[in-house]
Amino acid sequence: MPSLKVQADKRHLNEIALTILLAGFTLVFIIVTVTLKPFADYANTPITIAAFISLFVCLIPTTIGGLLSAIGIAGMDRALRANVITKSGKAVETAGDIDVLLLDKTGTITIGNRKATNFYSADGINAEHFKRCVVLSSISDQTPEGKSIIELAAVNPLSYAVSNAVYIKFTAETRCSGIDFENTRIRKGASDAIRLLVEKAGNTFPTEIVERVKAISSNGGTPLVVAENEKVLGVIELQDIIKTGIKERFDRLRKMGIKTVMVTGDNPLTAKYIAEKAGVDDFIAEAKPEDKMNYIRNEQSQGRLVAMMGDGTNDAPALAQADVGVAMNSGTQAAKKLVIWLILTMTLPNLLK
């Protein structure tokens, strides 16, 4: 005798509740329609086709009004099961209609956690002195990049400890960090930011450093220039890896009519290299908070819906300006990866399907 196989309903409780709600609306609609004729006969009032049409006109808006909330709740529930908390059903609906998606490069398109791979001292600069300055400027840098610089130097940071040091934190505006102690000022940052400091002090930005920065950038790396008392000492090379399969995902988004834009603080050469390898449609290099805002506003002025993904406080204005803001918790890498996976595998555009 063949065994009876019972397959469990794998739908979520909210989806089951929505099905019951729809069935209830249908049942009420049928009862009202069916009983209309007996009541009309009892009241000796003839019923016409116009009456049935009027009934449909009156009930359909009521039904739609109830369904809109139910659909929004169902969409929010599906997002929640992918570890995405949505603020409203309207946000879910808007997410399904986005035209432009802005994404950070590091950790989203690339694996993140860029690592230092080489130190290049400028002509006439002692390599050991350059290494010491590199370590001093990275002691307070708790990012993966900063830690990798210490690892590449292969020294004990405590051996370079200085007294009464003032550490300068990195900001999106200055795009550099460093340390001040006694009469020494060490800065580490983007080449254009350091160049501005050097030339403002009346010093020359070495030609060989310019060429080294271009070479690193053209190879997809990120160059960090180090200066001491507004004089260039050398360059640190950072390298990152593009995530496997990311280009295919962007191709799928493109077929859906969604334009992808990479946002990065890297220089244009590095940004162009990564953008071409990853397959995004556009990129914003050396991005500052106002650059993101301006890009979003420009797209919105042309009638497009824009989604913005960000994980830092400097992304807050852009997240607020975008039609859909996806705020990622930078302190929880697992949750961050889930949000990235959700966006790039097109869950958001299909939440309502």
Image (cartoon, rainbow, N blue to C red):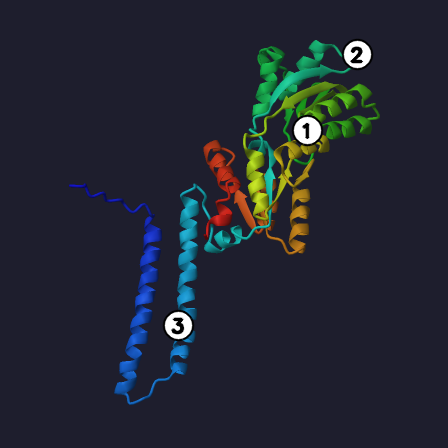
Q: Dot 3, how many residues are within 10 Å of its Cα: few (below 14), some (14-19), or many (20+)? A: few
Taking the spot 40% from the left edge, 64% from the top edge, the residue there is 66
- 63 shown above or below 275: below
Observer-side mark, 1 or 3, equals 3
| Residue denoted by label 3 | 59
- 163 shown above or below 256: above
Is residue 265 in view from this perspective?
Answer: no
**Is disc 1 placed on a helix, strand or loop?**
strand
Residue 282 in which image quadrant: top right
x, y percentage for residue 140? 59, 23
x, y percentage for residue 228? 74, 19
| Residue denoted by label 2 | 124
Observer-side mark, 3 or 2, equals 3
Amino acid type at circle 3 is Leu
**Is disc 3 placed on a helix, strand or loop?**
helix
Q: Dot 2, how many residues are within 10 Å of its Cα: few (below 14), some (14-19), or many (20+)? A: few
Split into 4 quadrants, where in the image is the N terminus?
top left
Taking the spot 64% from the left edge, 30% from the top edge, the residue there is 170
- Between residues 345 and 6, which one lies in front from this camera angle? 6
- CA separation in Å, label 1 and label 2: 24 Å
Horizontal side, residue 21 vs residue 291: left or right = left
- Between residues 253 and 12, which one lies in front from this camera angle? 253
Q: Dot 1, how many residues are within 10 Å of its Cα: few (below 14), some (14-19), or many (20+)? A: many
Amino acid type at circle 2 is Gly
**Is disc 2 placed on a helix, strand or loop?**
loop
The earlier-in-sequence mark between 1 and 2 is: 2
The earlier-in-sequence mark between 1 and 3 is: 3
Is residue 251 in view from this perspective?
Answer: yes
Observer-side mark, 1 or 2, equals 2
Amino acid type at circle 1 is Cys
Residue 176's label in the rendered image is 1
